[in-house]
Image (cartoon, coloured by chain):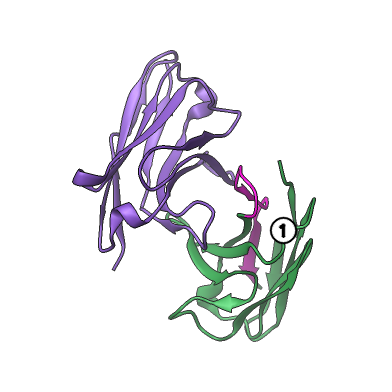
Chain colours: A green, B purple
Amino acid sequence: DIQMTQSPSSLSASVGDSVTITCQASQDISKYLNWYQQKLGTAPKVLIYDASKLERGVPSRFSGSGSGTYFTFTISSLQPEDIATYYCQQYDTLPITFGQGTRLEIK
Amino acid sequence: EVHLVESGGGVVRPGGSLRLSCAASGFTFDDYAMSWVRQAPGKGLEWISGINWNGGSSRYADSVKGRFTISRDNAKKSLYLQLSSLRAEDTAFYYCARGLRSGPLVWGHGTLVTVSS
């Protein structure tokens, strides 16, 4: 199985800050990586697909980059409504695997 | 708009069985592979099973292989997951999701399965 190592596991930042989460795959997954946001008590929602494509309707402050084994997810100007847990997910090879998640808090 | 509604969750004793259903709308159901993903309370996401568009091919995570069975009925636009030989560690929210190995998953709201004596 492909292991997805996501870091940090938690993050605290101020409104307006730029925050970055990284995800490292245990083998080459090309661009087949998605980023999800999960707010408390709700299902995950895709923000970025194919490593860098912004899902329709998602604010442009969210972005993703990378290919192969190393990926980053950035929120350029943190907003209070961005409080959530974020997950990366690879779909290059079954089984689909997720990163451990990053819990984002506002200072 | 894609709409996925899971049902069938509840409390079941260890060793028991349960059948989850997922009703799909807002897209052409038989154009898509489908998945089940679960999340233990306070924990991360675990993909557990997927099925291709016509039900001819399915895959399972090792953690559920031989105990869970995925199926679909395209005429009813529905996805199913039969859970058997349930264990305490199967306690989780179970999400139905559109997709498998093409693009992002689109999720239902989830249904809670609690395995407890």
Residue B40 horizontal side relative to residue A107, left or right: left
Residue B61 picture location, percent across and down: 57, 34
Looking at the image, is B83 positioned above or below residue A59? above
Residue drawn at (50%, 28%) of the image: B90
Looking at the image, is A16 positioned above or below residue B8? below
Provide the chain ID for the residue under circle 1. A
Image quadrant where one finds the C terminus of chain B: top left
Residue B7 picture location, percent across and down: 27, 40
Residue drawn at (41%, 19%) of the image: B84
Residue linked to disc 1: A29
Classify residue B3 by image quadrant: bottom left
Nearer to us in this view, A41 or A23: A23
Residue B72 picture location, percent across and down: 31, 39
**Category of crowding for the residue at label 1, using alpha-carbon neighbours closer than 10 angstroms: few (below 14), some (14–19), many (at least 20):** some
Residue B18 horizontal side relative to residue A76, left or right: left
Classify residue B20 by image quadrant: top left
Looking at the image, is A56 positioned above or below residue A23? below
Q: Which residues are magenta?
A: A92-106
Image quadrant where one finds the N terminus of chain B: bottom left
Q: What's under tag 1, amino acid-wise?
A: Ile
